[in-house]
Amino acid sequence: MTGGEKAGRIALCYGTRPQVIKASAVRRALAARHQVLAVDTGQHYDFALNELLYQQLGVAPPDCFLGTGSGSHATQTAAVMVRCEALLTEQRPQAVVVIGDTNSTLGSALAAAKLRIPVVHVEAGLAAADYLMAEELNRRATDAIARVLCTPSARATARMRAAHADATVVETGDVALDVLQAQLDRLPAVTHLRPPDGRPYVYATLHRAELTDDVALLRNVLATLSTLEHSVILAMHPRTRAALEASGPAVESNGGLTVVPAVGYLESLALAHGATAVVTDSGGVQREAYWLGVPCVTLRRETEWEETLELGANRLLAPDQAPDLLQARLADAVAAAPWDRSAYGRGDAATRIAQAATLLAGEGNG
Ligand code: UD1
C-alpha cells in the first residue's frame, strides 16, 4: 500500500456498549489501511450505551445500523445473523472483525463464516469455568470459527495455541487499554456525580444476568452497598433498572448509596479514577480499575481477567456470600495497591489487530 491507496474492504461488527468503545480504536487503525464497513448491530440502543459513546470518542456514525435491539438470546443472535448475512452478501468484505463475547459477536461471526468470509476475533482466548454462561458460549463458539485470534494476554495466547492449532494467534494486548490511554487527559470533573466536599467514595456498576435474573439477590446486594462505610455511587445499567422495576419498587438513592443512570464512557472512567475502590461485575470496569491503580472487588464467583486477581488488583466476592464480607474485601483490596499494570499489553493493540486483519484479507484473495 502506498500513496494513500487502501487495501480491500474489511467489515467491523459490534453492538454493545463495551464493543462500541473498543471498536472506536479498531476502526481507526483499520481505516489507516482499508476501506472499513462499520456495522453496529443495535443490540444496545439506549443513548448512554450507544450514541453518547460515538460522540465522546469522536467516532463517525456506523456505515450500517442493523437495529436488532433486545430479545431472548436466540431471538437476538438470530436477528444479528439474518441482518448481517444480508449485508455481508451485498457488500462482500474480505474479512470480518468481531469483538468480545456478546450475542452480536457470535451472530456476526457465524453469518460471516457461513458466507466463507474469514473472521478475526478480538479479545480471543478468555475463559470462564461456567461454560453454559451466555458469554462463555458466545466466546467459545466464536474462537472456534475465527481464522485469526487476537488475544489480550499471554495466558489467552497459550490457551488459543493449545486449542486452535489451525488458526493464527496474535497476541495484540487489550484494545480497551488503547482507548483508555487516549482519553485519560480528557476526563471530566464529574463533580455533579461525586459526593460533596471531596469525600471518598466507592464507584459501583452491576448489570450481569447472574444478578439481574435473581432480583432478590440483586436487592440484597444493593442493600449491602447502602450500608458500607464509604459513600457509594452506583451507575445503574438499564438492564438492572428494568429488572428492579419489573419486580417491585425501584431502588433510589438511600443511606450512603447514590444511584445515577448509566453514565458515558468518560464519566465512568472519571468516577473510577477518583474512587477509593470499585465494586463491579463488569469485565471492562475491572480492567479499567486495574490500569488506573484503583482496587476492585468483583461481585462474581469467577473472572475471565485472572491476572488482575493474581497481581492483587482485584478480589472476588460471590454476590450470595455474607454481605459483611464486602466491607472486609474492600479493606483487603485497598491495602494491596500498587501492582504491576502490564498484563494486557502496552496500549497498541488496535494497530496489531489491523495488521493481522490485513494479512487475513490478503489471504482471502487467494
Ligand atoms: C450484553 C452482553 C454482555 C455485556 C453487556 C455490556 C450478551 C449475551 N451480553 O449484556 O456480555 O457485558 O452487554 O453492557 O450479549 N437494555 C436496555 N437498553 C439497551 C440495552 C439493553 O434497556 O440499550 C435492557 C433491556 O431490558 C434488555 C436487557 O437490557 O432486554 C438486556 O440487554 P442485552 O443486550 O441482551 O444484554 P446486556 O445485559 O446488556
Image: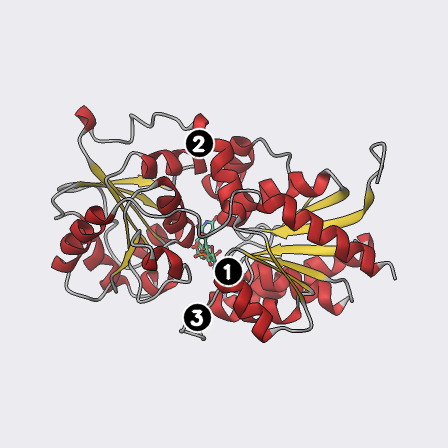
Element carrying mark 3: loop
Element carrying mark 2: helix
> Which mark is in front, 3 or 1?
1
The circle drawn on residue 133 is: 3
Vertical placement of residue 13 versus 164, above or below: above
Which residue carries the number 2 mark? 184
Query: In the rendered view, does 43 fall on the left or right side of 2?
Result: left
Gap between marks 3 and 1 measured at Cα: 24 Å
> Which mark is in front, 2 or 3?
2
Looking at the figure, which quarter contains the C terminus? bottom right
Q: Is residue 74 visible?
A: no
Looking at the figure, which quarter contains the N terminus? top right
Query: In the rendered view, does 309 fall on the left or right side of 27?
Result: left
Neighbours of disc 3 within 10 Å: few (<14), some (14-19), many (20+): few
* Residue type indicated by callout 1: Ala
Which residue carries the number 1 mark? 154
Gap between marks 2 and 3 measured at Cα: 33 Å
* Residue type indicated by callout 2: Leu
* Rendering coords of residue 307 (x, y %): 39, 58
* Residue type indicated by callout 3: Met
Element carrying mark 1: helix
Residue 360: image quadrant is bottom right
* Rendering coords of residue 289 (x, y %): 35, 45
Q: Nearer the viewer, residue 269 or 84?
A: 269
Neighbours of disc 1 within 10 Å: few (<14), some (14-19), many (20+): some
Gap between marks 2 and 1 measured at Cα: 25 Å
Query: In the rendered view, does 232 fall on the left or right side of 237?
Result: left
* Rendering coords of residue 75 (x, y %): 56, 66
Contact check, label 2 and label 1, Cβ < 8 Å: no
Residue drawn at x 39%, y 43% is 291
